Amino acid sequence: MHATRVLCFVLLGMLIIATGWAAPAKGGSWLATGTVMKLDGNTVYFLGRDNAVYLIDTSRTVMLSNTSSTDVEPRPGDLVRVFGCTTRAGEVKADRIAGIGLSGQMHGSVFLDRENKVIRPAILWCDQRTGAEVKEIEKLVGKKRINQITGNPVFTGFTAPKILWLRKNEPDAYRKITKILLPKDYLRYRLTGEFASEVTDNSGTSLFDVETRKWSPEILKKLQIKPDWLAPVFESPDITGKVTAEAAGLTGLPEGIPVVAGASDQAASGCGNGVVSQGIISTTLGTSGVVFAFSDKVLKDSAGRIHTMCHAVPGTWHLMAVSLSSGGSLRWFRDTFCREEISEAKIKHKDPYEIMTAAAAKISAGS
């Protein structure tokens, strides 16, 4: 009997649990520790210290960390290391893996030099340092024009403002750039040796024309970003390369299996939820909240309230309404105003949210 063919989706959003890499600061005290998982036979721990979070192995090597409230900079090489440990720790046998599909958080940036070496730590989606650059892009391209081309306003977390920030604040690093990749596409390069990008992730860069499904020459020219810095564009199911012998040795994956273009986290989630035809909508609630809808044609909100992006289903699009503080707001409300409910929940051995929800249910809508 032939082995079951397994399409392995690598969710970088799960790997990037803590989203900045840096050495622990001196002083302070550890707030919490907890075993996370076994990687390569090593126990890995979460540790919290002051305003930082670290993922540390038993040799005290900092694998992942978040040390700033505004600047989020992981080292891409560490991503590859954690990925390799995770694939080796998995329970699926290598000979059952038929291919790899990549998915991950959108909007990040990995900068490479002429030797394809990482120039500096990556800057992720949640980094908020680029307010001035957003205004600069709106001035250079036009606020309405950027929305017409990309289907979205420019946000501080998007990729284009990060590039302009680097040009202004780290000119030596900027001069070394020969390639700019999104985080999952850097992992693709390390797996296959090939540079490639895809339409869903590119839709969140502020450099991509969502209607033509190509990089926008107009925006690149106005922002003075070289087109050859950006990777060739593929549709999500397209094969973009094969796992190299080097990558196979690092990860335990079979050499030569295909790596497809993949999709952004939300587009991949949409496929998983079955939002792949007209009239289907999904809602995802966590720290943030997303309403996700399929569209077989380009629909753009001129007011910029709804995101329009290319879908992982070739030749289609998806619409998103996003709140970055959905469940996060409810948690803040609980911690700030619901001390009595928290105490009641402890006595009744319930979750505080159950008590809060029961109380809210007694209040009529719109009160």
Image (tube, grey):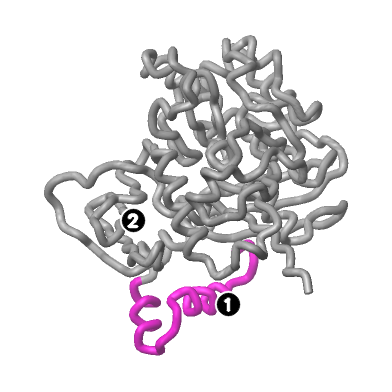
Local packing at callout 2 (Cα closer than 10 Å; few below 14, some 14-19, many 20+) is many
Please count the marks in the image.
2
Q: Is residue 82 left or right of residue 62?
A: right
Residue projecting furthest to the left: 27
Residue 320 lies, in percent from the top left, at 69, 46
Local packing at callout 1 (Cα closer than 10 Å; few below 14, some 14-19, many 20+) is few
The earlier-in-sequence mark between 2 and 1 is 2
- Residue, x 14% and y 46% (percent of image)? 26
Q: Is residue 10 visible?
A: yes
Residue 35: numbered disc: none
- Residue, x 44% and y 54% (percent of image)? 17
Question: 286 or 176: nearer the eye?
Answer: 176
Question: 339 or 363: nearer the eye?
Answer: 339
Determine which residue is flagged by label 1: 362
Q: Is residue 359 left or right of residue 320?
A: left
Q: Quadrant of residue 317?
A: top right
- Above or below, 29 relative to 126: below
- In the image, residue 349 lies in the stretch drawn in magenta: yes
- Above or below, 227 relative to 274: above
Q: Is residue 201 left or right of residue 126?
A: right
Q: Amino acid at mark 1?
A: Lys
Q: Mark 2 or mark 1: which is in front?
A: 2
Label 1 SS: loop
Pick the quarter of the image with the C terminus: bottom right
Q: Amino acid at mark 2?
A: Leu
The range drawn in magenta is 339-367
Question: 292 or 323: nearer the eye?
Answer: 292
Q: CA distance from mark 2 to mark 1?
A: 43 Å
